[in-house]
Amino acid sequence: MLRTILIHPDPRLKARADEVGAPDDEIRALADDMLETMYDAPGIGLAAPQIGVMKRILVMDCVKDETAPRQPMVLIDPVITGRSEETNVYEEGCLSIPDQYAEVTRPREVDVTWTDLDGNPQSQHFDGLWATCVQHEIDHLDGKLFIDYLGPMKRQMITRRMQKLKRELARA
């Protein structure tokens, strides 16, 4: 089922999400909805707070090639356990801040642990776009947006654009 993606500013996007613990059928159904919503948007990552669910769960699939098979990932209660000192700069966007992009510097590589949908512990080393995406989505779980990495002027400008967009959507 497609879910509605919250648009910044929304207080839920600035709040820390709650731990999930052991996944159940409700969490598995949420993960399915999140993947469907992410692919439909279209995006490469989505965190539960972006659809108003204050749980520490994210989905991502950084395969950009339309002819390649999808590689959907569901991470429950993810934790970054290691970061490279080397950084990457990516032009990031966000489904909760549509059509706005900015360069963000993050560690080039990260190690992440999480629980999968079967309740099993997982860990993986991410690099490149996958590393940027997982860091961006974990930030959402902590109530942080990519625009929080920008200077105050640019952040305010984007926030004003989003407020205007929300007013226009409310009128439509």
Image: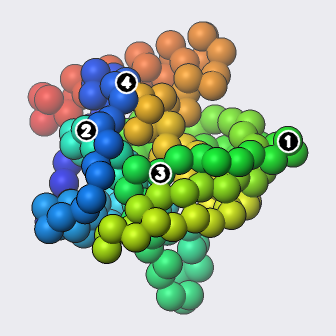
User: Which of the labelled discs sits on residue 85, or is there none?
Assistant: 1
Q: Residues within 10 Å of mark 4 (few under 14, many from 20)?
A: some
In the image, 158 versus 10, the foreground residue is: 10
Q: Dividing the image into 4 quarters, which one contains the N terminus?
A: bottom left
* Pointer 2 or 4: first along the chain: 4
Q: Quadrant of residue 13?
A: top left
Q: Residue at x 75, y 54 (%)?
A: 109
* Pointer 4 or 1: first along the chain: 4
Q: Residue at x 40, y 50 (%)?
A: 77
* Pointer 4 or 3: first along the chain: 4
Mark 3, residue position: 78
Tag nearer the camera, 2 or 4: 2
Pointer 1 with pointer 3, Cβ within 8 A: no
Q: Residues within 10 Å of mark 3 (few under 14, many from 20)?
A: many
Residue 156 at x, y percent in the picture: 50, 13
Mark 2, residue position: 54
Does residue 46 show up?
Answer: no
Mark 4, residue position: 14
Colour scheme: rainbow
In this picture, residue 39 sits left or right of residue 90: left
Q: Dividing the image into 4 quarters, which one contains the C terminus?
A: top left
Residue 73 at x, y percent in the picture: 45, 69
* Pointer 1 or 3: first along the chain: 3
Pointer 2 with pointer 4, Cβ within 8 A: no
Specify the amino acid type for callout 2.
Met
Q: CA distance from mark 4 to mark 3?
A: 18 Å
